[in-house]
Amino acid sequence: MRPARLSVVLVAHGSRDPRGAAATSALARAVRRSRPAWDVHVAYLDHAGPRPLDVLASLPGRRAVVVPLLLTKAYHGRVDIPAVLAAASDLPITVTLADVLGPAASFPAPEVPSLLLDGLVRRLRACGPSGAVSALDAVVLAAAGTRDPAARATVEWAADALSARLSLPCAVAYASAAPPLPGAAVDLLRASGARRIGVASYFLAPGYLYDLAARSALEAGAVAVAEPLSDAPELARLVAVRVDESLLSVSAAA
């Protein structure tokens, strides 16, 4: 008998905004196209369905990798998703947890920031006319926000890396939980002499917090706001990197 296909379960936070589920579904389709041998599923921690445990329960006798669709290892990555894995230990399925898509520490493996930065730059280039990035003189990296200082440190690391990639000043901003708001970050950059400020979106999907970040930045005078990463090719490749890493880790421990 042929071995069962590897099941990959993409776990998103979930949103009341239907655009969130649409973006997650688009990413799942991109992953399926890049890895047709995988059986790719989508699950949500809140609001939308199905729930991760229900999806895992539907895969008896299978081997599954759970991939958190998160850019930081804040509360959902540290508590909610490990709780799902603990509950799944009673199911007749072998489950492995992959790391979050963003850097999980201040000094991540080289391939992770490279893919993330490529995706951020892709979205930034797409949000204006040709040469939009070259026309900017500063960038704000806008994220959802978290009270977890270690998670915020990884966002700050991403902003520093994006600044180096673009050779532009890059300030961090958050839509919630921590200052500054994107509009305040735009104000600070303008006070330092920047005039054409763009916003790179450290979001996986659109929703309330993304809209809040975009509105805050535009009202303060930002000239362009990038769309969330969603199904960017780099993000689909990053999912594959996280799955491969988790499988290698299991093999090494065996």
Image (cartoon, grey):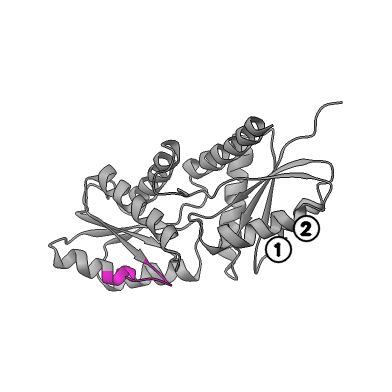
Q: Nearer the viewer, mark 2 or mark 1?
A: 2
Magenta range is 174-184
Identify the residue at horizontal 56%, vertical 57% (top origin).
Answer: 77
> Badge 1: few (under 14), some or many (20 or more) residues near its Cα, within 10 Å?
some
Residue 196 visible, this angle: yes
Find residue 25 and report its horizontal and vertical position in percent: 62, 53
Is residue 184 shown above or below 30? below
User: Mark 2 touching mark 1, by CB under 8 A?
Assistant: yes
Disc 1 residue type? Gly
> Badge 2: few (under 14), some or many (20 or more) residues near its Cα, within 10 Å?
few
23 vs 192, left or right, is right
Q: Earlier in the sequence, mark 2 or mark 1?
A: 1
Please, what is the dominant secondary structure of the magenta stretch?
Answer: loop
Q: Quadrant of the C terminus?
A: top right
Find residue 27 and report its horizontal and vertical position in percent: 57, 48
Residue 226 visible, this angle: no
User: In front here: 187 or 93?
Assistant: 93
Disc 2 residue type? Asp
- Residue holding disc 1: 49
Distance from the alpha carbon under mark 2 to that under mark 1: 9 Å
- Residue holding disc 2: 54
Tell me which corner region of the image, top left, top right, bottom left or bottom right, holds residue 13: bottom right
Tell me which corner region of the image, top left, top right, bottom left or bottom right, holds residue 45: bottom right
Residue that sits furthest to the top in the current view: 1
Picture disc at residue 157: none
Identify the residue at horizontal 26%, vertical 44% (top origin).
Answer: 164
Identify the residue at horizontal 65%, vertical 67% (top origin).
Answer: 46
